[in-house]
Image: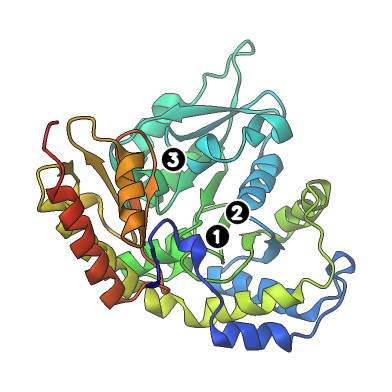
Amino acid sequence: MPDLIDLRSDTVTRPTPAMRQAMATAEVGDDVYGEDPTINKLEKSAAAIFGKEAAIFVPTGTMGNQIAIRIHTQHGQEIICESRAHIFDWEMAMTSAFSGCQCRTVAAERGILTWPIIASAIGPKIYYRAQTALICLENTHNMAGGTVTPLATMQEIWAGAAEAGLPVHLDGARVFNAASALNLSVAELTSGFDTVNFCLSKGLGAPVGSILVGTAEHIEQARIHRKALGGGMRQAGIIAAAGLIALEQTPALLPQDHANARLLAEAVAAHPSATIDLEAVQTNIVIFTLTGNGDAPAFCAALKQKNVLASAIGPHSVRFVTHYDVSRSDCEQAAAIVSTQLADLKPGA
């Protein structure tokens, strides 16, 4: 059987040989006691890369985001986020379950929040209204198609939030993709955030883990909340070792993922049986809609029969995500298969 071309997500990557070697030889200790040297090295390295005081390794991005929300809020408050935000749609209502807060969602074109949009959603200082406690951005924005919020837009948000006395958290699951697209360092791109969570196991390709960075005080609190959520691990240096390789080696590969996503997007755009916003294809995610209420799950099932895996993210919408485990040749092959499949659909049918 031919190898599958897996475009469902960048979470499907397999560890590189360098990662496997690092994992096999990792120096370990008990991280709950703070004694795992590889975990400590990873956290110190991440904090330095982002220009923050401290960092904490967590098993998942959801845990990192939810710890940050807990740090910045009190029960009965609100968090402003974009209407398709990961913290709102994909984190199991933990904002309410763990932090006792609700999301005040606001829609933004291509998922890019601006300060005027945010300012209009800040709750008035009235005792009988839930008070705004936190602003959460997502960069890149997954369900908007991997779109990138520009630095200038975020600088305006940082300034407005500071004047309003509100902290700002970044769900930066794919922030290295955003930095690559803007040709900036992640430190430059995230300098005004109080906390940043980023994934090692998406575009960077490590098998497990995310990291939350912030002030030393924030990270001290984060250790308490991580333990409460069951995230205190023991000899976790075995997986942290792969994270160190991911931080050191994978960011340089991201431009190729972005170029491969553009190749797939242009193949889709050539067919009237699908609609796609090419300007929104800025990193490694491609989202398109089948015209005439086309059946996305059936479309993905047909692709699977041809050894291409994709995700239906709604009744009529399909998502591709590129990563280092799909080569340029793989993507060219996938683009040809997708083109054939789209050509077989009847536009508007």
Residue position marked by numbered label 3 in the rendering: 160
Residue position marked by numbered label 2 in the rendering: 61
Q: CA distance from mark 1 to mark 2?
A: 7 Å
Q: Position of residue 30 (x, y in %)?
A: 87, 72
- Front tag of 1 and 2: 2
In the figure, is residue 224 to the left or right of 71?
right
Q: Residue furthest top?
A: 128
Q: Quadrant of the N terminus?
A: bottom left
Image height of 229 relative to 243, above or below: above
How would you rate the neighbour count of disc 1 (Cα within 10 Å): few for under 14, some for 14-19, many for 20 or more? Answer: many
Q: Nearer the viewer, residue 283 or 344?
A: 344
Disc on the earlier residue, 1 or 3: 3
Of the residues shown, which amino acid type is indicated by label 1? Phe
Secondary structure at badge 1 equals strand
Q: CA distance from mark 1 to mark 3?
A: 24 Å
Does residue 42 appear in the picture of this structure?
A: yes
Tally of marks: 3
What residue is shown at x 73% (from left), y 57% (from top)?
219
Label 1–label 3 contact, CB within 8 A: no
Label 1–label 2 contact, CB within 8 A: yes
- Front tag of 1 and 3: 1
* Quadrant in the picture for residue 237: bottom right
Image height of 210 relative to 97, above or below: below
Disc on the earlier residue, 3 or 2: 2
Q: CA distance from mark 3 to mark 2?
A: 27 Å
Of the residues shown, which amino acid type is indicated by label 2? Gly
Residue 198, disc = 1
